[in-house]
Amino acid sequence: MKPLACIAALIAAPATADPTITLTPDTDLAWESTPEGVAFAALSGDRWSEAYFAMVRLPAGTVSPVHTKSANMYGMILKGEMTHAIPGADTAPIGPGAYYEVPAGLPHISACVSTTPCVALLYQDGAFDFVPVAQ
C-alpha cells in the first residue's frame, strides 16, 4: 500500500509555477565592482550566502594575492587570458573556451595576464569568500 500512497500523493501534489527560459543579454547584466576593480554580475544565487553562478570581470594585469576559498570554484574563460596557479608553480595562460577548477582550501593566485580585461563564467558550490594566505 505504501507505493500506492506515494503515487497518490504525487498526483495530488499542487502544480508548481510554469517553467520558463531566462535570456539575459550581456548589456543587461548588473555589474558590481570591488574596490580592486574586479566586477561580478550575478546570474543565479546570492554569492554572499549560497552556491552561485556569476560573471566575473578582472581588469587587465590584475594579480591576486595568495588566497583560498571555502567553496570549490569552477570557471570558463570567455574573454582575455588568465592563470590560476599554486604559488611557485609555473602555469600557462588559458583563454576563451578554457575551463578551470580550483578546489576549496587550496592556496592559489589568480591573474588576468592579457592586455584586455578578462571575463569568466564562474560557479562556486558555496558562498563567496576570499581568504588571504600569509606568506
Image (tube, rainbow, N blue to C red):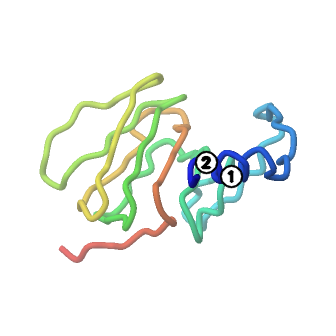
Disc 1 on helix, strand or loop?
Answer: strand
- Residue under label 1, please give it: 42
Query: Among all residues in the image, which is located at the extreme bottom?
Result: 134
Residue 133 in percent (x, y) is at 26, 73
Left or right of 95 in this view: 7:
right
Picture residue at 52% right of the left edge, 38% below the top: 120
Q: Which mark is residue 105?
A: none
Using a 10 Å C-alpha cutoff, classify the residue at mark 2 as few (fewer than 14 neighbours), some (14 to 19) or many (20 or more). Answer: many
Name the residue: 61% across, 64% down: 34
In which quadrant is the C terminus drawn? bottom left
Q: Position of residue 3 (x, y in %)?
A: 57, 48
> Which percent across, then down, holds residue 94?
35, 29
**59, 119: nearer the viewer:** 119
Name which of mark 2 and mark 1 comes first in the sequence: 1
**Local secondary structure at mark 2:** strand
Q: Which residue occupies 85% across, 47% down?
A: 15
Q: Is residue 66 left or right of residue 99?
A: left
Q: Name which quarter of the figure residue 48 lies in.
A: bottom right
Residue 87 in which image quadrant: bottom left
Q: Is 133 located above or below residue 58 in the figure?
A: below
Q: CA distance from mark 2 to mark 1?
A: 4 Å
User: Do the residues under discs 2 and 1 have CB atoms within 8 angstroms?
Assistant: yes
The one nearer the camera, 63 or 45, is 45
Graded by Cα atoms within 10 Å as few (under 14), some (14 to 19) or many (20 or more), the crowding at tag 1 reads: some
Name which residue type carries label 1: Ala
In the image, what residue occupies the spot 46% across and 69% down?
A: 129
Q: Among all residues in the image, which is located at the extreme top?
A: 97
Q: Position of residue 112 (x, y in %)?
A: 43, 42
Residue labelled with disc 2 = 54
Tag 2: amino acid: Ala
